[in-house]
Image (spheres, rainbow, N blue to C red):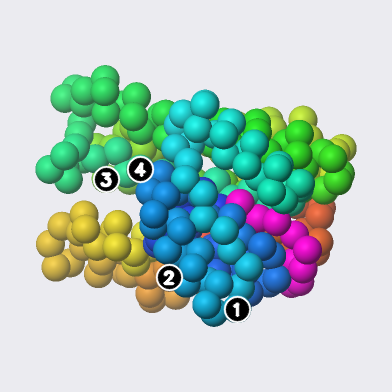
Amino acid sequence: MSKNGRVALVTGGGRGLGKAIAERLARDGAHVLLADVQGDLASETAKEFGEAGFKATGLQADISSESSVKKMYDEVASKFGRLDILINNAGVLGLESDGKRPLVESMSLALWNETINVNLTGVFLASRGAIPIMKQNKWGRIVSVSSRAARMKTGLGNSNYAASKAALIAFSRVMAGEVGRSGITVNCVAPSRIVTAMTLAVAVGKDYFEKNVAETAVGRLAEPADVANTISFLCSDDASFLTGVVVDVTGGSFMA
């Protein structure tokens, strides 16, 4: 699915799922912009991509900060003059400092606000900044990473995370209607549990992943490439008639 000549911005692109998505888009021929709150990490990953023969640039950006996002897009406009693809991947799990999933009655307002600011407001700010640039070429793809937690009942706690990811889907559907006639599509992917450093860090008990495997129809957990491959298709010319949809990348653990 050639993306030669396209410029793709991936938030949270320095590691984990964001890195896998960026690598897939780079393999497709896009110049990937890796935006990460850890600017050094973004630069290191961009260097790694460059050594592998891909076009990549690292950017420091805090998507929950309006001024930081504006600075990021000023840099994109001045250095590249275009933006074709935006992947809203950056996010937080919304856990307490000890890794526990807080119940509503014990959740602090600070933790709630942090989760919403990154997972939802950050997508709003990044999308708002991307649209005017995409409109210049009357072509664009915006894909946001939601979660299976937004689509079905999950375990107790973490209502802040589930709420932010569910709101992201509704936000994307409305945005799809607003920009569709400008040649821009807006979609979401909703993955189930993915094996990344982040999920490994919060795994509880030896059967943590085994339970997730048992829920799937295909008998395995999702790999970052499963999500990245789906996003690659949604960002292609072949997906021009798909907008406002949610693709459940769950191996059959959720079937709408």
- Give the x, y percent position of residue 17: 44, 61
Counting residues from the start of the chain, the first of labels 2 and 4 encountered is 4
- Give the x, y percent position of residue 86: 64, 48
Which residue matches tag 4? 92
Is residue 211 in the magenta section? no
Counting residues from the start of the chain, the first of labels 3 and 2 encountered is 3
Which residue matches tag 1? 53
Counting residues from the start of the chain, the first of labels 1 and 4 encountered is 1
Where is 230 relative to 84, above or below?
A: below
What's the distance in space between the residues labelled 2 and 1, CA to CA? 23 Å
Residue located 50% across and 32% down the image: 68
What's the distance in space between the residues labelled 3 and 2, CA to CA? 21 Å
Q: Which residues are magenta?
A: 1-9
Count of numbered tags: 4
Question: Splitting the image into 4 quarters, where does residue 177 fall?
Answer: top right
Counting residues from the start of the chain, the first of labels 3 and 4 encountered is 4
Contact, mark 3 vs mark 2 (Cβ under 8 Å): no
- Give the x, y percent position of residue 93: 32, 44
Counting residues from the start of the chain, the first of labels 3 and 1 encountered is 1
Where is 82 relative to 55, above or below?
A: above
Closest to the observer, 151 or 120:
120
Closest to the observer, 118 or 105:
118
Mark 3 residue type: Gly
| Tag in front: 1 or 4 | 1
Which residue matches tag 2? 223
Mark 4 residue type: Val
Q: Is residue 229 left or right of residue 159?
A: right
Badge 3 density bin: few <14, some 14–19, many ≥20, Cα 10 Å: few
Mark 2 residue type: Glu
Residue located 59% across and 55% down the image: 33
Contact, mark 1 vs mark 4 (Cβ under 8 Å): no
Residue located 61% across and 73% down the image: 54
